[in-house]
Amino acid sequence: MEEEFSKRRKQILRAKAKGLTDMDAWHKTRKEKTPGVNKDEITKDWQERISKYKMNEADNKVKAKEERQEWSKEAQFNIEAEQERAGLRGKNSEDLMWQNAIRRATERTALASEADLIHEYMKETMRTENWDPSTYSLTLRSLENQFDQGKIIRVKEKGKKWVSRYTSLELIAAEKAYINFAGVYSKTDYNIPAKEAESYVSELNRNNKAQGGRVMSEIQSQAVVDMLSTKNMISVVQGDAGSGKTSSLKAVADHYKNEKGFEVLGLAVQGVTAKKLADEAQIKALTLKSYLGRQRDDRKNGRVIIFDEASMLDSRSAAKLFRNAKENGDKIILVGDVNQLESISAGRVFYRYVDYYQRMNKMTKEVKLIQMNENYRQRDEVLREAVDAAKDGNMKRSLDILAEHGHITEIADKQHRRAQIAHLYSKDTLIIAGTKAAKKEINKEIRGKLKAKGELMDEIKYKILKSDADGIETEAEIRLAKGDIISFTRNDYKKYDIRNGEKAEVLENSERNIKVMTEDKRILDINMNEYKNIEYGYALTTYKSQGQTYNKVIIESDTAVPVLSDMRNQYVNITRARDSVKIFTDDIEDLKELAEVKTYARDTIEMDQDKPIVRKEKTTEKKKEYEINNPFLMEQVKSLQDITEKYKNTQKELTEAIYTIKISDNEKEEIKNVLNGKDGVKLIANYRGNTDTVIYTGLCIAKKSIDVLDKYPIGKEIKKEIQNSFKKNLNQNQRD
């Protein structure tokens, strides 16, 4: 039924597959409305179309199950599909449904909103095919039960008033697991004495100099010594963009391979980063997903794992990787830059390790943070100055420098802006766009310009495969000509040895094959019936560009998507260039303002700093509704709250004083919560309970425990503050 009456979407998708943009596809497939439509004719048409289908519930369930199974097999990147394959869905169990929901809700962020969590839970209830009516309040009650039983964790988000966030025990366990490996010694003896490491580096530099090669700097050389001499299972290298990390990594890899006989394996989140690491360090390299998904481990000896662009490592993957390394006696070298893009999935592993090693470095020599902060990339003085400012965290100053020298252009109109970018394109230029949609539009503009100049010849249409965010592939079309720049979108380790994100130029094309030259000058004959994961590669997104270096870089920064114009994105963008950067934006001042904002991922480790939501004890006693509306009482409560804030370091003493008052334990707990809370006034004002208890909560410190305060270090000062607050506008009767 859905397929019969929802044909427009398929028409739009087919139009987009032929290369049309979203809006063009929408217009192309839209039929003009026919005036004077006859209602009876429409009804008859619908009935005829409905009659073609069996309205049989059993048959519908069978078909739905088949479609769901097919989807779950194809959606390799979707957590819901993974749960489906594991047989975890469709069970009529509250606990399991909530666990499935919280797992999905915390895939991209460690602390999920209440709305996102409930949305995922409702998908679970529908999956069970239990259509009993429910309400939002009933769902909230079910969530409360999960929280009460400790099966879902709730925290108050730091810096905001009573905003509930939720996380899972599974994610907390993963993050505790990976952080517990920080500073741990490796059980395999990988390290060598520092003196021996220094001798190795000195000899290596002498040999390189004698052969006309590059000699490592003092910082690069020291980084090699530190990596080779540390006993830690996990070494951490914080290296700024363009600091020459790869030279040091190659020296380390050569020592472990040639001197120790260890296997050295490179890892990265992105395929193109892994390929670059393999080429430059001359080691085998895989994506993290490929490595963790392997069924066998053919190792014969110890293994050293070099993880490049480690800022992209997420918590769950880190826990698996580090646990695996511990069990097999491996050593891991994390290499990255805390200023660059963080993981898409939940967690900020590299930042946590840099922070921990930096702090431990001050207390012991046994844990060392290896830092590389030189700049070997930027050759233009203006660009170097701008990059230096960016590294110092002053992105506004960085953009000011570029603007002063004419490197930032403001063009409000999107089409005109992208046309200008296309006009400046050359083969040694990297075009960076914030979104996939922007990338697609810029690619189209560039191809149009090149075709007009006659630089793209003999265009042929090919069938290709396009993947969505879940990993589901759909067939599409692409026109490729001699001279086209393409980008591969799937890793192929066996036949072509190409990686997702790698670029190439089309040299020749025929009906079935294209001959291309990759950026590392390899010539490949690709059978388009075998490998179909290709797109135009003139422009890349910021995410895909991390780890790449070009002579010239042109950036489109559209402030309409603020999160893609923040400090991290701009830092990655401008540090890709050796010689020049040009930024095109819709609003320069907005761009500067957004670039001052440094966004970062959340993790459950921050829960140590967040305050859990205060839970009230349940009671069978029926409470009458009460809300404070007495201005005098509210003024006094406000005064008490101000005092509590002023003396927040003495909350323990105040709490102990309250416990001397002769009221029920439940009431004492309520008062204690007020004193320890950051918003006690609001808590009291909204408290629903016995009138006497409410007033007691507001006045007990001043009236009943005033003498007790003398026992404590600053009691007299607190007592004086309280007395003064109650003298103001307070007659004898009120005081009594």
Image (tube, grey):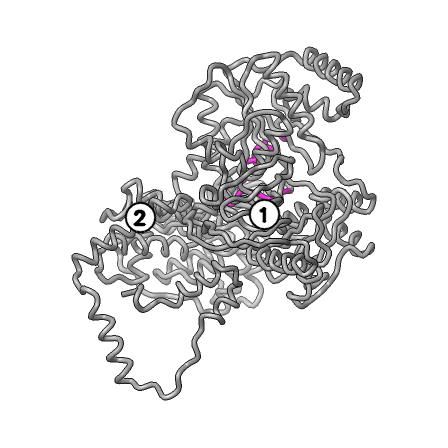
Q: Secondary structure at mark 2?
A: helix
Confirm whether the magenta stretch covers residue 703.
Answer: no
Q: Name the image quarter holding residue 367.
A: top right
Q: Earlier in the sequence, mark 1 or mark 2?
A: 2
- Give whichever of 546, 722 is nearer the camera: 546
Total numbered badges shown on the rendered structure: 2
- Give whichever of 382, 160 is nearer the camera: 382
Task: Single out the residue that lies furthest toward the bottom.
Answer: 36
Q: Label 2 near label 1: C-beta < 8 Å?
A: no
Q: Which mark is residue 486?
A: 1
**Height in image: 681 above or below 501?**
below
Q: Residues within 10 Å of mark 2 (few under 14, many from 20)?
A: few
**Height in image: 235 above or below 696?**
above
* Residue occupying image coordinates x 67% and y 61%: 452
Residue 250 falls left or right of residue 137? right
Query: Can residue 573 be seen here?
Result: yes
**Amino acid on which the number 2 mark rests in the picture:** Glu
Q: What is the distance, in whole Å, between disc 1 and disc 2 at their CAs?
A: 30 Å
Identify the magenta region.
Answer: 340-359
* Residue occupying image coordinates x 75% and y 42%: 578
Residue 6 falls left or right of residue 566? left
Where residue 315 sits in the image (x, y, percent)?
48, 37
Quadrant where the image shows the N terminus: bottom left
Where residue 400 sits in the image (x, y, percent)?
78, 54
**Amino acid on which the number 1 mark rests in the picture:** Ile
The residue carrying mark 2 is 70
- Give whichever of 391, 63 is nearer the camera: 63
Q: Which mark is residue 307?
A: none
Residue 326 falls left or right of residue 250? left
- Give whichever of 375, 707 is nearer the camera: 375
